[in-house]
Image (cartoon, grey):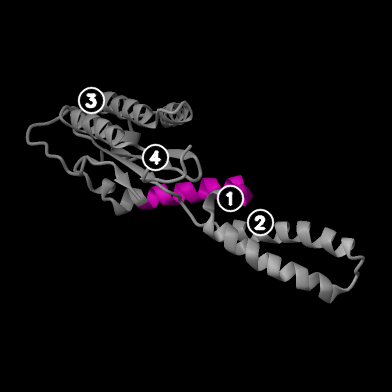
Amino acid sequence: MKHSADDFLSEDGRRRIEERIKAVELRTAGEIVVMVAGSSASYPQAALSGSLLLSLVLAIPVAALYGSHDMWFFLSLFLPLLILFNEILTRVPSFCRLFAAKQAITEAVERASLAAFYARGITRTDSNTGILLYVSVLERRVRVVADKGINEHVAPDTWDELVGGIVGGIRSGDPSGAIASAVDRCGGMLEQHFPIQPGDKNELENRVIIG
């Protein structure tokens, strides 16, 4: 998977998704938002843990190689390495992610997707029919957040299946196709429970959000 939100989708891929969103919203009272985020958190704890581990792994054998048991000699090796690795891990998120706990990643993606759901105004649709398809590139995670109007009619495992379809498409090298298919499936659910009504208006932009 690409590690940059900017190049995760091609221009054609973005247009394809945006056209599907527009088509769905012409026949339903729902609002679908697709967001591709570069990452959901900076993971400072993972950077610190990783730099500690890497510094120890290098400093201990070097000290042993020199036959030194002096603590100051060890610290003269360890501390510069700690600073160096912490800087590297902070600047290279894909490397830092290797030291992030799975639970920390899950929680970060959940927090970021919920924050985006509220910040983008998806909770403020007239019928509470907003859906966010959130892709976090660094973490290689996808999350679907739906407003209460939709969740009252849709089984929770439906979103898990939707996420699985998107993840599968991303792994096969077709992220835009996978996301477009997910938009279509959301459209089918919305059409069943929230068909378009007279006077319906487009409440949110149809463009794919990158950021």
Marking on residue 191: 3
- Disc number lying in front (4 or 3): 4
Dot 2 falls on a residue whose secondary structure is helix
Which residue is more in the foreground, 133 or 78? 78
* Number of numbered discs: 4
- Disc number lying in front (2 or 1): 1
Labelled pair 4, 3 in contact (Cβ < 8 Å): no
Labelled pair 2, 3 in contact (Cβ < 8 Å): no
The span shown in magenta is 96-115
Labelled pair 2, 1 in contact (Cβ < 8 Å): yes
Alpha carbon separation for disc pair 4 and 3:
29 Å
Which of disc 3 and disc 4 is earlier in sequence? 4
Which residue is more in the foreground, 25 or 189? 25
Per the image, the residue denoted by label 1 is: 95
Residue type beneath disc 3: Glu
Residue type beneath disc 4: Phe
Dot 1 falls on a residue whose secondary structure is helix
Residue type beneath disc 2: Gly
- Disc number lying in front (2 or 3): 2
Per the image, the residue denoted by label 4 is: 8
Alpha carbon separation for disc pair 2 and 3:
48 Å
Per the image, the residue denoted by label 2 is: 50
Which of disc 2 and disc 4 is earlier in sequence? 4
Alpha carbon separation for disc pair 4 and 2:
27 Å
Alpha carbon separation for disc pair 1 and 4:
18 Å
23 left or right of 94 in image = left
Q: Residue at x 7, y 36 (%)?
A: 199
Q: Residues within 10 Å of mark 3 (few under 14, many from 20)?
A: some
